[in-house]
Amino acid sequence: MACDTPADGTGAIGQAVDEAVLRATFPDAATRRAMVTTFGAATLLAAIADVLPLGIAREAMAQPATPEKRDLRIGFIAITCATPIIMADPMGFYRKHGLNVEVIRTAGWAVIRDRAIAREFDAAHMLAPMPLAMSLGVGVASPQPWAVAAIENVNGQAITLANKHRDKRNPANWRGMRFAVPFDFSIHNYLLRAYVAEAGLDPDRDIQIRSVPPPEMVANLRAENIDGFLGPDPFNQRAVFDGVGFIHLLTKTLWDGHPCCAFAVPASMPREMPGTFAALMRAIVEATAYSNAPANRREVAAAIAGPNYLNQPQTVIEQVLTGTFADGLGQVQRVPDRVGFQPFPYHSMAIWILTQMRRWGQLTREVDYAAVANQVFLALDAGRAMRELGLEVPADTMRRERILGRDFDPAQPDAYLASFAIRR
Amino acid sequence: MQREVSAWRAALLSLVILALFLGGWELALQGAGQGGGPALDPEYAALLGQAAATGGQTPMPKPSEIGRRLFQLLSDPFYIRGPNDQGIGIQIAWSLGRVLLGFGIAALVAIPLGFVIGMSPLLNAALNPFIQVLRPVSPLAWMPLALFTIQDSSISAVFVIFICSIWPMLLNTAFGVSAVRREWLNVARTLEAGTWRTAFRVILPAAAPTILTGMRISIGIAWLVIVAAEMLVGGTGIGYWVWNQWNNLSIADICIAILMIGLVGLALDRLLGLAARAVAWNE
C-alpha cells in the first residue's frame, strides 16, 4: 500500500521527514532559517533530493507500522454525530486494527476540551471548529495544537422550536427569541447566526444565543427557558418524541454537506505515534464508511442506543439514522440523507469556519486561512487511510460550497466575508 | 425537656404522611400527559413517545413507575457493562470511596492543625481571617481552579471534597481544644505530665465530643459536595449517574438517585453519631 502514499511525501509524516532532512543538512538553526527564507523549503528539498533518496525515506516512514500504543482512551459526547467513534467499539473496528480502545462518555464540550488538553484522552470527539480555535489560541489560555484527523458526520443537525411557535416558521419573526447552541465554537452557532442574519436579524442584538450542553436542550425547551435550538441529534428527535417541540428544518437545507463533528487528535500524534495514528485512522475511516451505508443504519442504531453509549430510546436513534422520522407537526418525513458520515476533512470547510470566526468577532486578528486549514485539517492523512481501504478520495481539498443560497469560493474568503451586511 | 412519645406512634404517623404524599402524587398524575388531541396517523404515532402520541408531553413519572424502576435497579446493583454503564451500587461505592478519601485526608490535616490552633491563641488569631474567608466558598467555585491546576479530574473531585470538609473539623477542633477547662490543665501540670501526655490524656478526651461534632458536620458537607463534583467531572459515581439520567431525561431514575443519596447521607451521619456517643462524657 505504500505506493499509494502521496509520492511527494505530503501529509504529516512526509512533512516530518522533510523537516528532519532539513535539520540534518543544516544543523545550525540560523543558517537553516536563512536558507529556507532565501530559497524556500521546496527548492531546498528538491536540491537535497538530487543527492539523497528522499522519496524512499518518506515512503519508509509512511509504511503501516505497528501501533506504538495500543490501549487508548477516546472521549465522546453522547450524540449521533459521534456514531463512527462509538460504534467502532461494539462493532469491533478498533480491535480489527489492533487497538484496545475505551470510549468514555463526557459531560460537555468544555470538559472534553479540558480533558483532551490534560491528555486524559488520547483522541477525542470534538466539534469541527474546536481544533481550529484551540490551535489558534481562541477560547483557551494558550494555543493548544490539535488537529481534525477526520470529519465524523455531515448534516444531521436541525433547528427545533417549542410547540407554541408552530406559526413562526419565518425567521424574520424570531426577534426576541432565545436559542441554544451546543458551544460557541460549533458549526451550529455559525449556521444559526448565518441563518437569522440572512433573514435580516442581528444574532447578537435581535435574538439571544446561549451555549447549552446538548442533553440539556430538551429539558430547557420544556421548561420554556429557550424558544428553540440548533442542536445535534438525537435531541431534536427526542424533543419530538417527548412532545416538547417540532423540527423546523434540517440543517442540510442550509448547507448540504456541512461538517459537524470531528475526530480530533493532538497535532503531534502523527509524528510521535505514527503507527497508532495510522491504525486509528483506518479504524475510524472504516467505521465512518460502514455507518454511512444506508443498509447498515438500523444495525448501527441498535449497537449504540444502549446505556453504555447514547442511552436513548432506540426508536429515536433509528429515526435519526434512517431519516424516516416524525417531524412533530403530524407528518412522517422520509429524508434518507438526514445525516451522512464521510471522513474527508475538506480544507474549504475549515476556511468557511474561519471566516465565520472572523465574522462574529471570535477571531480578532488576520490569519492565513489556507495555511491554518492545511495545518489543522489533516486531509492528506485522511485521504491516505481512505485510499488504503479502497474508498474514493476527493481529488481536491478545496471544494466550492453552496451555503444559504450563496456561493462560497474558498480561494476568495475575504471577498465572501466582505459580502455580508451583518457582521462584527 | 420534651415529653416522651412512643416510637411506634411516631413511626405510624411517618408512614401515614408517606402514604398520603405518594398517593397524592400518584393521583395527581393520573391521566397526565394525555393531550386529548385528534387521533394521529398510526405510523406517525408509532415514532413518538407514549404521551406525545396522544398529543401531550411526557409527564412526571408516577410513584408506582419509580418503584418498579427501583426494584429493577436494586435487583442487579453491581453489574459492569463497559465504562459508561455500571450498576447503581458500583456508582455509590465510587462516590463513597471519593468521599472517604477526601474526608480522611481532611481529618488528618484538620485535627492536628486544629489542635495547634486551639492551644495557641496567637496562631488562632492569625489564621482566623483565612479560615473565615475560605470557609463559605462553594465547592463549585473550587472546581475550575482544581481542574486547571491539578489537571486530573478524579484527583480534582477528591480535592474539592477535602477543601470543603476541612473547615468544620478545623474550627471545631480548635474550639474544643481551647475550651478545655483550665483546672484540668493545672491538675495535669501539678502531676508533672509532659506536653504530649497532657495533649493525649487530658485535652484529646476532653475535646473529643466537639471534634466529633465537627466531623459529623464535615461528612454531611462532603456527601453534599460529591454529587456536584461528580456531575462536573463525570466518569463514575452517583453524581455522574444523576447527570447521565438527566441526559436521558429519565426523571424516575433521578428520583431514585435522590432517595439513594439521602439514605447514604443518613447512614454516614448515623455512623458518626454512634462514634460521638462513644466518646461523650458526663461530669
Image (cartoon, coloured by chain):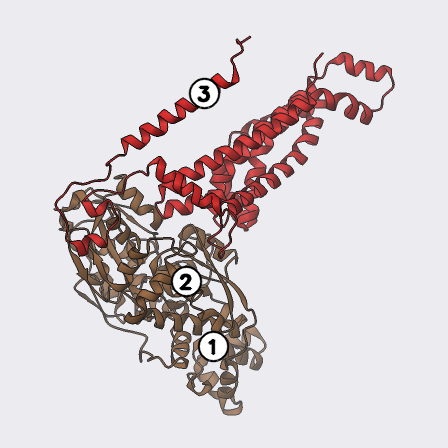
Chain colours: A brown, B red
Q: Chain of mark 3?
A: B
Q: Is residue A409 above or below residue B32?
A: below
* SS assignment at label 2: helix
Q: Position of residue A190 (x, y in %)?
A: 28, 56
Q: Residues within 10 Å of mark 1 (few under 14, many from 20)?
A: some
* Residue B215 visible in rendering: no
Under mark 3, the amino acid is Leu
Which residue in the structure is indicated by mark 2? Answer: A86
Coordinates of residue A140 in the picture (x, y in percent): 44, 53
Q: Residue at x 49, y 91 (%)?
A: A50
Mark 3–mark 2 contact, CB under 8 Å?
A: no
- Quarter-of-image position of residue A301: bottom left
Q: In the rendered structure, which amino acid carries the disc numbered 1?
A: Gln
The residue beneath circle 1 is: A15
Q: Is residue B113 visible?
A: yes
Q: Is residue A405 left or right of residue A211?
A: left
Disc 3: which residue: B12
Of badges 2 and 1, nearer the viewer stands 2
User: What's the residue at 61%, 41% (across, down)?
Assistant: B101
**Left or right of B178 in this view: A87:** left
In the image, residue B197 above or below residue A87: above
Q: Which residue is at the far right?
A: B192
- Give coordinates of residue B240: x percent, y percent: 46, 45
In the image, are marks 3 and 1 on the same chain? no
Quadrant of the rendering where the N terminus of chain A is positioned: bottom left
How far, Cα to Cα, is label 3 from label 2? 52 Å
Residue type at tag 2: Ile
Residue most toward the bottom? A50
Q: Under tag 1, what secondary structure?
A: helix
Whether marks 2 and 1 lie on the same chain:
yes
